[in-house]
Image (cartoon, helix red, strand yellow):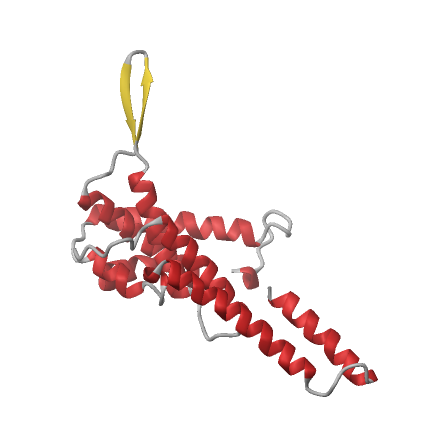
Amino acid sequence: FTAIKFKAVKQIMEKEQIGDARTGSAFFVWLGFNLLFASFATLMVYIEPVAAGSGIPEVKCYLNGINIPRIVRFQTLACKALGVLFSVSAALPVGKEGPMIHSGSVIAAALAQGTRSISIFGHDWRILEFRSDPEKRDFVACGAAAGVATAFGAPIGGVLFALEEGASFWSTQLTWRAFFASMITIYTLYVVRNSENNWGTAASTKM
């Protein structure tokens, strides 16, 4: 969206230079695009009010036992992702760190709820049965750690964030799980961001 905005502004500026457009038209085109994108971002918050803000305070409340309605719903994730997209396109001062932490928590909660059963040789097998509150909270803590690791490129920092700022209930087992989730996230980010390079030649600027 940003590329579309600046392409249109550039075209108007070129017309201003040759006299086909009035002076200052490019500014109003730029302002119109920003207002349009900001309106879409506001619409996302209207659809899902929990998607407003960074999401870090809400995730911390959830990890400390406060059940905030719709905080880890897929609709919240979609509205937050689109809201951040349109907010950045509107040149608003927003960052990726908070939304990535919230997004990681939502994805982790979705994995914890992804229970289904299959029947093999007459036996009912359960896949990903983590529907209890403590298990779901552990998943959200790992998701928050993975979000921090993705935002800053620091898996240990993600574990420390979830340990110090997030969950009140912690264990050694959860520490290793959060670290493993952060490492897998960093590896996935490394692969995606370096896909245009030859395998084995990392570019540190891509992280």
Furthest toward the right, the residue is 18
Q: Is residue 65 left or right of residue 125?
A: left
Q: Residue at x 48, y 74 (%)?
A: 92
User: Residue at the location (23% across, 63% down)?
Assistant: 164
Q: Residue furthest top?
A: 121
Q: In this rendered view, identify the residue nearer to me: 108 or 74.
A: 74
Instruction: Identify the residue shown where x is 34% and y is 51%.
Output: 106
Q: Which image quadrant is residue 58 in?
A: bottom left
Residue 132 image position (x, y, % from top left): 19, 40
Most foreground residue, 177 or 109? 109
Q: Position of residue 109 (x, y in %)?
A: 30, 46
Residue in the picture at 38% in, 63% down: 46
Outermost bottom residue: 23
Instruction: Look at the image and tell me in which quarter the N terminus lies.
Output: bottom right
| Tally of numbered tags | 0
Where does the image place residue 143, in percent across and percent down from the top left? 33, 51
* 42, 84: nearer the viewer: 42
Q: Is residue 170 above or below residue 110?
A: below
Please state the horizontal and vertical placement of residue 56, each as a whole percent of the image: 31, 64
Q: Is residue 111 visible?
A: yes
Q: Is residue 150 left or right of residue 22?
A: left
Inspect this view and state whether residue 87 appears: no
Relative to 37, is 158 above or below? Answer: above
